[in-house]
Amino acid sequence: MEEQVLIAGFGGQGVLSLGKILCFAGMKKDYNVSWLPSYGPEVRGGTANCQVIVSDQEIASPMFEASTAMLIFNEPSLHKFEEWARPGSAILLNASLIASPLTRQDVRAYYVPASELAEQAGSLQCLNIVMLGAYVAACHTVDEETVQAVLTETFGAKGEAVLQMNLRALDLGKTYIQTQK
């Protein structure tokens, strides 16, 4: 098993943090992981993306040009990276900010109203965790319990309210995908 995930959006949307959380979840399951961030000099508001690999084998390179899954947070990232998806890949799109449909028919598309679900969870700041929940439900690379454990480690020190908000966001993303199947 080797999942090559491209996560892309604007700086400030939690793109890089989501990649780290996915890596930590993979490490908890004793997978080999790689996280390769890329961002513009503006950081917040500029472009940001990362390449994450989760594998049960050694990882030869942290870079790839064809992903098995994508989490796309905005329209410019969709136009830039859509062609990077392998046929059969899962592409999860933040339908709140992406008006264009995918041009490809050889991928599994998931249009997630991530911004609205994040606000329902308690804050637009957990948009990335909504997308993570959707990814967990669509791709099954890491299980929900492992991701919940990582979220508890990541957000537990920020207080119970912040942790519960992120756990709600994870569940809302997961539930949205499950109800779309």
Image (cartoon, rainbow, N blue to C red):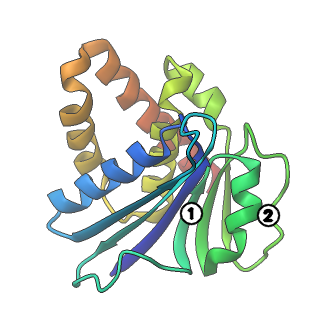
Secondary structure beneath dot 2 equals: loop
Q: Nearer the viewer, residue 180 or 49?
A: 49
Q: Name the residue beneath numbered marker 1.
A: 70
Residue 109 is left or right of residue 99, and the answer is left
Residue 95 is left or right of residue 72, and the answer is right
- Residue 62, x across and y down, in percent: 36, 75
Q: Nearer the viewer, residue 62 or 159?
A: 62
| Contact, mark 2 vs mark 1 (Cβ under 8 Å) | no
Q: Quadrant of residue 160?
A: top left
Q: Amino acid at mark 2?
A: Leu
Residue lying furthest front in this view?
A: 41
- Residue 20, x across and y down, in percent: 33, 50
Q: Name the residue beneath numbered marker 2.
A: 102
Mark positioned earlier in the residue sequence (2 or 1)? 1
Q: Residues within 10 Å of mark 1 (few under 14, many from 20)?
A: many
The answer to whether 110 is drawn above or below residue 30 in the figure is above
- Residue 32, x across and y down, in percent: 21, 72
Please give the name of the residue rendered at 64% of the width and 76% of the height, measured from the top-left corner.
84
Please give the name of the residue rendered at 25% of the width and 46% of the height, measured from the top-left corner.
145
The Cα–Cα distance between marks 2 and 1, rounded to whole angstroms, is 12 Å
Please give the name of the residue rendered at 43% of the width and 47% of the height, measured from the top-left corner.
16
The answer to whether 122 is drawn above or below residue 81 in the figure is above
Which image quarter is the C terminus in? bottom right
Which image quarter is the N terminus in? bottom left
The answer to whether 39 is drawn above or below residue 80 in the figure is above
Q: Residues within 10 Å of mark 2 (few under 14, many from 20)?
A: some
Q: Amino acid at mark 1?
A: Met
The answer to whether 107 is drawn above or below residue 73 in the figure is below
User: In the rendering, which numbered label is found on residue 43?
Assistant: none
